[in-house]
Amino acid sequence: MERDQTDSVMWGEQGVPVSVRFDDPYYSLEDGLAETCHVFLDGNDLPARFQPGFHIAELGFGTGLNLIAALRAWQAAGTHGPLRFTSFEAFPMAPEDAARALAGFPEAVPFADIVAEALADPATPLMRPDLELRLVLGDARQTLPGWEGRADAWFLDGFSPAKNPELWQPGLLAQVGRHTAPAGTFATYTAAGHVRRGLVAAGFDVARVPGYGRKRHMSVGRLNDGQ
């Protein structure tokens, strides 16, 4: 698997970006922002769990839409201090492609400059009064084991397991478990059986719940007391 290369994008139905490398859309053809809120915010019981110092980690930064949804919720909740957000990304999107994708969501447009700044210089953390953003470039199978952080909530948002199996391997999911804070959670759009089994093995109590739109199911979980 190649590392640290910008992903090439095709533009599909209704202007949805599609990864050339993985032949998979970056988000739902129906409403990407609504999907993000359902899967990653609701799936992690956010914003109800927000507290000062809360840390979200993510596999797959993509267009930055998940970050924007989380930051909007953080601002609306009025939680003190910055939201901590760490995203692991092997093939970052070009800033101009991310801007084009985000332009399709009026609620996201005011935050698009944050994503553009992060993607223009992904090696430099972005620090704001309301956000501490770090992009970790490279194959997450190699970068996550050495990460010193532990997340309160995980957004597992790689491309589909059939198209991007590297981000759904048991060894990587075990690292997700090891880098989760006590009582931390995950959410993902996929309900694939091997992914759920890998997350159970990683120490999570896993549930299959209703998905967004045409996806009947998704997966959520909480790190169990034995971890």
Image (cartoon, rainbow, N blue to C red):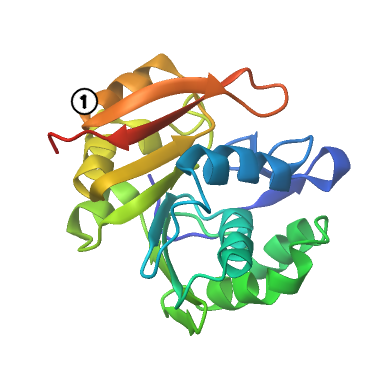
Point 80% across, 56% down: residue: 105
Q: Residue at x 41, y 75 (%)?
A: 123
Name the residue at the left extreme. Answer: 226
Q: Quadrant of residue 125?
A: bottom left
Placement of 205 over or under 193, stated as above or below: below
- Residue 75 locus on image (x, y percent): 60, 69
Residue 34, given in percent of the width and then of the height, sits at 71, 43
- In the displayed structure image, the side of residue 220 where residue 71 appears, left or right: right
- The residue most toward the right is 14
Q: Quadrant of the N terminus?
A: top left
Q: Position of residue 114 (x, y in %)?
A: 62, 75
**Residue 188 spot, x, y in % from top left:** 48, 35
* Camera sees residue 120: yes
Residue type at mark 1 is Ala
In the displayed structure, does residue 132 sit left or right of residue 102?
Answer: left
Which of the 4 quarters of the picture holds residue 28? top right
Residue named by callout 1: 201
Q: Say how many tags the image has.
A: 1
Q: Is residue 46 above or below residue 168?
A: below
- Quarter of the image with the C terminus is top left
The answer to whether residue 195 is seen in the rendering is no
In this view, the residue in front, 13 or 2, is 13
What residue do we see at 72% from left, 26% from top? 213
Left or right, residue 101 beside residue 76: right
Crowding at label 1, few (<14), some or many (≥20) Cα neighbours within 10 Å?
A: some
Question: Secondary structure beneath disc 1?
Answer: helix
Please state which of residues 60 and 50 is positioned toward the viewer in this rendering.
50
Answer left or right for 178 relative to 50: left
